[in-house]
């Protein structure tokens, strides 16, 4: 208690200002302004543009059009129902999976968790590419197997899967969104003490009854929150609907915004279409934090003494089957088909006599975009990760140590972009930085701003976790011995959070190199990244080179994750 | 109105020779600009050339590779996308003051009329172009048809027997093709746009409206549709590049070309140099290089295109142009209708 009081006194800017000029406050104000410029300026421009009619007058014309024009209203409805369907599908798959991992003696849990992590980090548009090759109604490999099983030719019966449909899109979105729900539910199960469940078991209830009557109600908040996150994720995706729904003539909000951006861009309308996406996201996130804010009913149980695992016995088989199906569809089959496609001439033909390295040769020795795309992607990734890490570390330090007046404001601004879908952020940035005084369009800077802003919340959460683990007492001790705040920061806190900082850097880097939904509106020929290069190749059905680039991107991502593990492991020892 | 002369207006099959003779009498010859050692040295100093093109990415890189072999001191960067997308990107870039493109190639010939009107192009006549038929070049030397192709129909020979294959656009309305068709998009592809305009002139929007009810899979590029039927994803292609079909046939893919009874849209793809090209000398070196007999023949042999160069021969096995009923392109008339065509098409088929 005494330490806390001392900490408060030392941390208060008042106490320091009494002795010498404290630069913390002006510095913090500068930071607030910088963050506000990053986050609020694009949103302000977005709002203004959406309200500006022909001739520059204030007008609701664009909004009227949004609700009257079926070409705009239909994508909105499609987005809403498909996102809800993804949320439900994710719950149906991920909730039982989380329960099985957390509460039962399911075998190979480490492997299963690793594969779930793999689907978490797989860029969703790569999954969509792979599923075109697997689930294309006639040439898709799964349908080819299906037809040969029936002894039929394509078109003689309806295909097993038609991935070019709203249903196909929902399925593929769910494959790469379920890990969010899994994580929510599994984390929630991990903190909910299992005594209540054990009591129920001791009183003679069968396992399924305990699960339904005791465990399920306890994780309802996590389920709801997971559903909302899944809904949000699917609503803001661009690549998956563009790859799977557009060929079927189905538009979503994100593909509509993209087509409104084709020259001559209809900026007012694009802004007006973006705003509902933003508002829905904000509303859902508020709902989610309200739900999670109740923290379930976990307080009832007190400290848990360790969970007794339910023995699955014969149920192990169906339980594993669920995992095999979900992970097979999200990892094994897609990765397999990408590797196959990268090494054969004709992707839909049999492997025998078809093996070839021509796509690798093309991508790495002939395709003149490769060098530029890799260069841009890495420069952007490194710049966004470095600047982003410095920014969130500074902001995190100031706001979590409550060093300045308005520290809440800093924390809020750093996490606010979580509510801005990538494509909406891009619309805002485009509007803000294509006209004087700030003309950044056509340079890497505008994409850099997009990446950094988009990754702020992730970085902030990551660094906040590290900072919270270091008690301020350590710094206070050094301050008592006469060190300045900066010196204490560098000598004491710095080394302790070093690995956390490195992990933050890698997180932002991974998030940046796979970005598509914002880049698609902001890139120009000079500033193409790997992801938009792949998107260009898709428009001409060049699946071989796409597979080669996909594999390269996945290898880089997994190398980065191994690095994160390396650094976060060292932190715990 | 001088540019109207450039467009091919003859109905039905036409003779290049008569057209050439006719035009020769009228057009004043534009002075050609040879590739001089000084030009190459200046280009090498600029270091590179940026080529926006709508030709299939592998054919584009094939040309780029030949260019590198000839001029090892000039880097060449290819930016490939659909013609309409190339057009949008350049306009977006120019509106934002970004001068990145040196040389452009698009299969929507009306783009060049527009850019010339905007005064964005630099006049330059490659030596070989002097011998090109006048209808395939701008009389003031701003652009010339670098390549041509046909927007053909096609089918997968494993999925459709030759005797059952459609022979005309109207055949595609047969219920038996429902769910089996694939088509490219005039909002993305210049070839698809030029083709759509030609089909509308012959069959009307009424035809496209009926076609849109056939469960057509909508792809973007006319380079994508031949790959789709080659993979067996769809059985019949409504429109696609003849050159991609030749490439697939050379690679022994199970596809065959259909030249529809109503006529096959003929699509010329000019190239031009931008007046504000960041690498003006390199741009001229590339532009001259593109029209040489050697590169024209390479594009024809390996890339399957049609050439308007008088010395270039089609390889054996390809149907000579003279035997195909052609629907000629008409960029000048099409230009003011482009936005409307795209809008009406998208309303029927989606994006």
Image (cartoon, coloured by chain):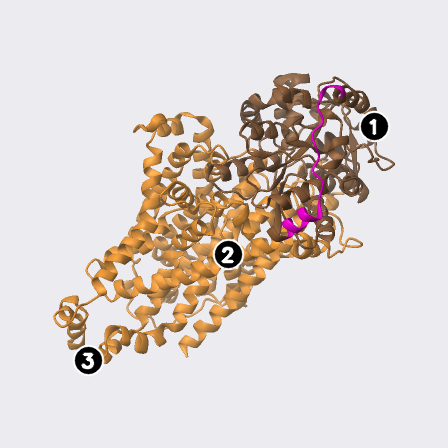
Task: Name the residue that disc number 2 marks.
Answer: A513
Question: Cβ–Cβ below 8 Å for labels 2 and 1?
Answer: no
Residue A185 in sight here? yes
Q: x, y percentage for residue A31?
A: 28, 58
Alpha-carbon span between mark 3 and mark 2: 44 Å
Q: Where residue A480 is drawn, which disc sits there? A: 3
Q: Earlier in the sequence, mark 3 or mark 2?
A: 3
- Residue under the point 71% across and 19% down: B9
Q: x, y percentage for residue A212?
A: 40, 55
Q: Where residue A386 is drawn, which disc sits there? A: none
Task: Quadrant for residue B249, please give it.
Answer: top right
* Chain under callout 3: A
Local SS, label 2: helix
Which range is magenta? B25-44
Q: Residue furthest right?
A: B316
Image colour assigned to chain B: brown
Task: Quadrant for residue A570, please give it.
Answer: bottom left
Dot 2: within a 10 Å radius of its alpha carbon, few (fewer than 14), some, or many (20 or more) residues?
Answer: many
Task: Name the residue that disc number 1 marks.
Answer: B163
Which chain wears orange? A
Task: Quadrant for residue B3, please give it.
Answer: top right
């Amino acid at each position: 208690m005494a330490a806390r009081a001392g900490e408060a006194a030392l941390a208060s800017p008042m106490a320091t200002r009494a002795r010498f000029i404290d630069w913390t406050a002006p510095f913090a104000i500068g930071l607030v302004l910088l963050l506000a410029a990053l986050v609020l300026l694009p949103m302000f421009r977005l709002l203004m543009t959406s309200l500006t009619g022909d001739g520059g007058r204030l007008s609701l014309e664009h909004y009227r059009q949004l609700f009257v024009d079926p070409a705009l209203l239909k994508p909105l409805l499609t987005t809403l129902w498909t996102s809800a369907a993804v949320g439900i599908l994710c719950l149906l798959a991920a909730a039982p999976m989380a329960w099985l991992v957390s509460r039962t003696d399911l075998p190979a849990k480490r492997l299963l968790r690793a594969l779930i992590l793999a689907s978490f980090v797989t860029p969703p548009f790569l999954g969509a590419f792979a599923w075109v090759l697997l689930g294309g109604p006639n040439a898709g490999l799964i349908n080819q197997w299906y037809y040969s099983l029936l002894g039929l030719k394509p078109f003689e019966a309806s295909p097993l899967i038609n991935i070019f449909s709203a249903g196909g899109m929902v399925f593929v979105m769910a494959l790469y969104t379920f890990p969010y729900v899994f994580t929510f539910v599994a984390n929630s199960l991990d903190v909910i003490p299992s005594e209540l469940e054990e009591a129920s078991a001791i009183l003679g209830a069968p396992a399924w009854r305990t699960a339904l009557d005791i465990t399920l109600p306890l994780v309802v908040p996590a389920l709801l929150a997971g559903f909302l996150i899944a809904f949000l994720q699917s609503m803001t995706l661009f690549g998956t609907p563009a790859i799977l729904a557009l060929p079927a003539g189905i538009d979503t909000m994100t593909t509509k915004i993209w087509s409104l951006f084709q020259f001559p861009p209809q900026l007012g309308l694009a802004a007006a279409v973006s705003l509902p996406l933003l508002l829905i996201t904000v509303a859902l996130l508020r709902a989610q934090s309200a739900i999670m804010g109740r923290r379930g009913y976990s307080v009832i149980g007190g400290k848990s003494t360790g969970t007794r695992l339910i023995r699955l016995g014969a149920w192990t088989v169906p339980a594993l089957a669920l995992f095999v199906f979900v992970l097979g569809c999200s990892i094994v089959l897609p990765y397999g088909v990408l590797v196959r496609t990268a090494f054969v001439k004709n992707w839909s033909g049999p492997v025998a006599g078809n093996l070839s390295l021509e796509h690798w040769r093309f991508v790495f020795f002939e395709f003149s975009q490769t060098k530029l795309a890799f260069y841009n992607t890495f420069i952007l990734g490194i710049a966004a990760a470095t600047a982003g890490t410095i920014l969130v570390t500074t902001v995190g330090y100031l706001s979590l140590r409550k060093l300045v007046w308005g520290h809440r404001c800093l924390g809020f601004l750093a996490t606010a972009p979580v509510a801005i879908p990538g494509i909406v952020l891009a619309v805002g940035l485009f509007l803000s930085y294509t006209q004087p005084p700030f003309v950044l369009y056509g340079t890497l800077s505008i994409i850099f701003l997009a990446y950094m802003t988009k990754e702020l919340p992730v970085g902030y959460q990551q660094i906040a976790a590290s900072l919270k683990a270091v008690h301020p007492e350590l710094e206070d001790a050094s301050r008592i011995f006469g060190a300045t705040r900066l010196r204490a920061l560098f000598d004491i806190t710095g080394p302790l959070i070093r690995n956390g900082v490195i992990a933050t850097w890698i997180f932002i880097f991974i998030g940046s190199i796979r970005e598509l939904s914002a880049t698609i509106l902001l890139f120009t020929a000079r500033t193409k990244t790997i992801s938009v290069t792949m998107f260009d190749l898709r428009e001409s059905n060049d699946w071989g080179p796409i597979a080669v680039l996909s594999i390269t991107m996945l290898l880089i991502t997994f190398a980065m994750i191994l690095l994160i593990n390396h650094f976060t492991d060292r932190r715990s020892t | 109105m001088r540019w109207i002369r450039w467009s091919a207006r003859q109905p039905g099959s036409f003779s290049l020779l008569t057209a050439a003779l006719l035009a020769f009498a009228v057009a004043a010859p534009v002075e050609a600009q040879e590739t001089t050692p000084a030009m190459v040295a200046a280009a090498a100093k600029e270091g590179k050339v940026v080529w926006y093109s709508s030709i299939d990415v592998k054919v584009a890189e094939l040309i780029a590779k030949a260019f590198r072999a000839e001029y090892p001191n000039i880097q060449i960067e290819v930016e490939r996308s659909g013609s309409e997308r190339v057009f949008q990107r350049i306009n977006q870039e120019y509106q934002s003051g970004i001068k990145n493109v040196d040389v452009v190639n698009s299969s929507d010939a009306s783009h060049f009329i527009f850019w010339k009107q905007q005064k964005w192009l630099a006049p330059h006549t490659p030596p070989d172009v002097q011998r090109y038929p006048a209808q395939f070049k701008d009389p003031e030397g701003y652009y010339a048809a670098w390549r041509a192709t046909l927007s053909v129909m096609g089918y997968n020979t494993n999925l459709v027997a030759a005797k059952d294959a459609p022979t005309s656009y109207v055949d595609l309305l047969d219920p038996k093709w429902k769910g089996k068709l694939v088509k490219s998009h005039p909002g993305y592809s210049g070839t698809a746009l030029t083709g759509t305009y030609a089909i509308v002139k012959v069959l009307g929007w009424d035809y496209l409206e009926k076609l849109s009810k056939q469960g057509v899979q909508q792809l973007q590029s006319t380079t994508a549709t031949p790959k789709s039927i080659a993979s067996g994803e769809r059985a019949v292609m409504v429109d696609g590049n003849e050159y991609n079909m030749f490439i697939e046939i050379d690679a022994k893919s199970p596809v065959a070309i259909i030249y529809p009874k109503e006529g096959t849209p003929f699509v010329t793809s000019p190239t031009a140099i931008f007046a504000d090209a960041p690498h003006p000398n390199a741009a001229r070196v590339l532009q001259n290089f593109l029209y040489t007999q050697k590169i024209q023949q390479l594009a024809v042999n390996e890339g399957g295109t049609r050439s308007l160069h008088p010395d270039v021969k089609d390889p054996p096995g390809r149907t000579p142009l003279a035997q195909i009923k052609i629907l000629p392109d008409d960029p000048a008339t099409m230009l003011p209708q482009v936005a409307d065509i795209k809008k009406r098409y998208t309303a029927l088929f989606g994006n």
